[in-house]
Amino acid sequence: MFYDLASTSWGEEERLAIARVLAGGRFTMGEQVRAFEDAFADTFGMKHAVMVNSGSSANLVGVAALFHVGRRALRRGDEVIVPALSWATTFHPLQQYGLKLRFVDVQLETLNMDVSRLEEALTPRTRMVVAVSILGNPAALDVIRAFCDRHGLWLFEDNCESMGASLHGKRCGTFGDIGTFSTFFSHHISTMEGGMLVTNDTEIDHLARAIRNHGWARDVPADTTLGPPHADPFFEAYRFILPGYNVRPLEITGALGVEQLKKLDQMLEIRRANATIFVRLFEGDDRFIIQREHGMSSWFSFTLILNPSMRIDRQRVMDALRAAGVGFRMITGGCFLRHEAIRFFDYDTVGEIVNANIAHDHGFFVGNNPRDLASQIVRVREVLDRAAVPDGVRA
Ligand SMILES: Cc1ncc(COP(=O)(O)O)c(C=O)c1O
């Protein structure tokens, strides 16, 4: 393919890291995972980082942990304010834990939650906001943080698409009481599959460590507030303190994470250089609504929404991209309200959901990768220039 959605960012260092783990003989969660967690916490300036086997699992463990905290614990039936556009597993743990979702529309330009609707979304049952920075572009996390502080709400930051982004000099993923990251193949760093939960709250860290590991006390430090150890070592070795899962990461993924994290800044620079070209080529053309950067984006990809008022045929555009060997796909998961899974949710919407539907029906994205994509982006521009014909204009 001429221009793929994603490509590998591994080099010799990652292959050597895998070989080291294989030679070492310890494959399940151990010191490599711990080393990655420590480096991650350090890089993001957070007290704690807990690695799991995916970003989805980080969301699941994080939501579960908030049901067991000693103070302000979530309860079934509590309400959560969420954006209408995100990935499915932003929402699924909320449903699985019996929370009610209040969907708020996104802004068409940033693709992030329209925070002017937050006050309207608030009810006496609201307990949490889930903030998502879509495809590298920081959401209005400062505004959402202040809103949560004002109303005593948890802020859960699903930052699975935006590692390396920042707002006012503060890294995305660190605004929330809990922040989550994904290290899946196509993401800013890749451990094949993988996810990370970060927090400054030691109780949440301990809860997350138990929940990811069968609800077991074993991976929780001895000084935990979650209860004293059993006096008898026989029973202490197998003490289950919470209803948990097994979503542990593998040592190989920890070792990969350590190597990939060293390259994050350099890879972000390349992504941002590609973005400069993309924005220069597309801005000012009314046929395309491209993502407007808010703060400093880590540019997961390049979104294009065909201006709905021009009635451009998206199918024709997608056919032309396919013919040119250009990969493209739906923007994140599109409008979640449009998926069959929504019938299992307890939810309502805060006013009308307009922009998430426009992104769903008229949008798509092409990839960004940590390598020079200048010629690919120029080609996309040429293809789209010809294929994106407003209705009423002769092709
Ligand atoms: C916003 C968001 N949350 C969660 C996830 C889940 O991450 P993973 O694929 O690692 O499970 C993704 C995946 O891309 C995502 O975009």
Image (tube, rainbow, N blue to C red):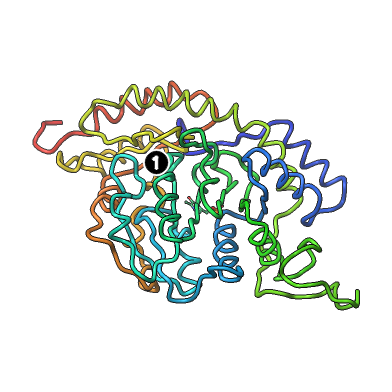
Disc 1 crowd, CA 10 A, few/some/many (<14, 14-19, 20+): some
User: Residue drawn at (78%, 57%), measured in percent from left and top?
Assistant: 28
Locate residue 221: give its quadrant.
bottom right
Count of numbered marks: 1
* Residue closest to the eye, 384 or 59: 59
Q: What residue type is labelled 1?
A: Phe
Using the rendered image of the protein, determine whether residue 195 is visible from the camera's viewpoint.
no
Using the rendered image of the protein, determine whether residue 280 is visible from the camera's viewpoint.
yes
Which residue, as the protein is rendered here, is positioned at the far right?
233
Which residue is identified by label 1?
328
User: Residue drawn at (37%, 25%), measured in percent from left and top?
Assistant: 379
Q: Is residue 354 left or right of residue 189?
A: left
* Residue closest to the eye, 231 or 375: 231
Q: In this view, does 196 lie to the left or right of 169?
A: right
**Residue 153, percent from left and from top:** 45, 61
* Residue closest to the eye, 108 or 23: 108
User: Residue drawn at (85%, 74%), measured in percent from left and top?
Assistant: 236
Which residue, as the protein is rendered here, is positioned at the far front?
150
